[in-house]
Image (spheres, helix red, strand yellow):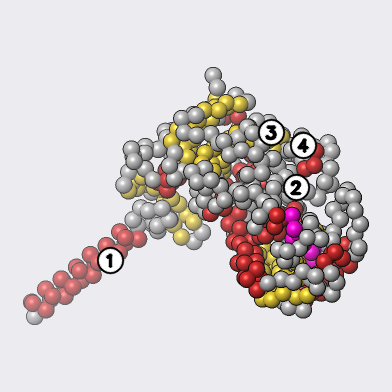
Amino acid sequence: MNWRRNAVGVLVLCLFLSSGLNVARVDAASNGGKCSKVGALRKTNGITYTCVQAGKTRRWLRKSVKSAAPSLPTSISGAQSLLANPSSPEPLENCRLNDARTVRAAGDWQAITYPATPSNGFTNSGAIDIAVVFVDFPDVPGGLAELRDHIASIKKSAEWYSWFSQGSVKYNLRIADRWVRAPKNSEYYYWLHPGKPGVQLMSDTEISTSYRSLAGSVVDTSGVTSVWAVLPKDITKIDEGFAYRAFPGVFSIGSDSYRARTPIWQHFVHETLHSHGALGHSPKNAQIGLFWNTGSAGATLNSWDAMTLGWMKQENIYCVAKDNVKPETLTLVPLEREQVGLRSIVVKLSDYEVLVIESHRKDRWSDRWPTGTAGVSVMRVDTRKDTVFDVGSSTGTYLVPAREHSLDFLKVGQTFATDGIRISVVATGDNDRIKIDRLP
């Protein structure tokens, strides 16, 4: 009997130890891991965590240390450096500006600062259904190989919106699988851009109705927000893309895009961005950002436009007022790369001015840039200035690169000063490390 009692005792002790080990694992200090007592502190691998109440559970949260910059190893990866970034000293809302324009050439519906208001069925948070139709003409037939290229290209528009809206917008593309023949020759579908001399044979309404009808013959157009019409590469009598902003809207591509070798998906993204309510066309640099130039080789959305559209998250911005700037070193994600982390440093100069500091690289959304292109840009936004594409007026202006169409970014070891703020690139590699401070 004694040996049985001893065996039972050993079994109970093992179960107790096993239970204790399980509790220890649950209570282990790791960011997001479960904990038991709110307010408890624990250090793991040199990082201090505090136990906080998160909904119905208690979890460890990495404790913010504001008194000193994080200690970094001599050799550090871009990902490690991004994790070491300090939190933004001010909330995102503090870096949004008032619209101080006295004249709005494009009308009130196109915003230069948050919040942009979408129109005609578009939304800045939710799903958008698009019908994509490939239209050829009796005088300009489309080819099978070209069709395959167009289908592959147009799918990138949905991928672009998913990334640059940070998942806020989902484009559902209903893509036709064949050409559909228009009833009239191509010249009848020529669209005369407002202010341009010439003759338009069909009205805007007639052109849009025809494209919608043709789309409906090959894809489901019920409930779509917009119809995109892709025309053959050999088109010559339709130079500009058609833009009919109604519900559902109709957009088409023209020969200008093919001559400029603009990927067709960029044309449709640019045009529909306006329907999301932002003015765009700023700052003026044909190499950086497809919202200024449809054919930009750097097919990105700058941080200010992302803020205007409501697609910038708190963790992606370091917001600080000029008077509160203290020496700080931060690591940025290149705008052209799909990488999670800090995208922008925004220094608020006044109620209508900010500096926007961004990193750039030849990457997924800039694959047409020259090999080795990299560096840091500095943009000043002034919401007293209206953006008027044709006359050169612009709400945003690149201070770096200084030349309008260059990629002459700020490089490692270089410093740029403006508005009492000094910006230095102190390290580079996968990511740029940037120091900001105030001039003495």
Q: Is residue 292 visible?
A: yes
Choose the circle earlier in sequence order: 4 or 3: 3
What residue type is disc 1 on? Answer: Ser
What residue type is disc 2 on? Answer: Leu
Q: Position of residue 242 (x, y in %)?
A: 80, 59
Local SS, label 3: strand
Local SS, label 4: loop
Q: How much space separates mark 1 and mark 2, taking CA atoms? A: 61 Å
Which residue ends up furthest to the bottom in the rendered image? 1
> Which residue is located at x 66 percent, y 36 percent?
404
What residue type is disc 4 on? Answer: Ser
Vertical order, 217 against 269 (above or below)? below
Q: Is label 4 or label 3 in front?
A: 4
Task: Give the numbered dot on residue 393.
Answer: 4
Whether pointer 4 and pointer 2 mark residues with C-beta atoms closer than 8 Å, the reply is no
Q: Is label 4 or label 2 in front?
A: 4
Q: Position of residue 48 (x, y in %)?
A: 37, 45
Q: Position of residue 322 (x, y in %)?
A: 60, 29
Local SS, label 2: loop
Choose the circle earlier in sequence order: 1 or 3: 1
Count of marks, rendered view: 4
> Which residue is located at x 46 percent, y 30 percent?
413
* Magenta extent: 248-256
> Which residue is located at x 78 percent, y 75 percent?
181
Front residue of this view, candidates 67 and 278 = 278
What residue type is disc 3 on? Answer: Glu
Q: Which residue is mark 1?
A: 19
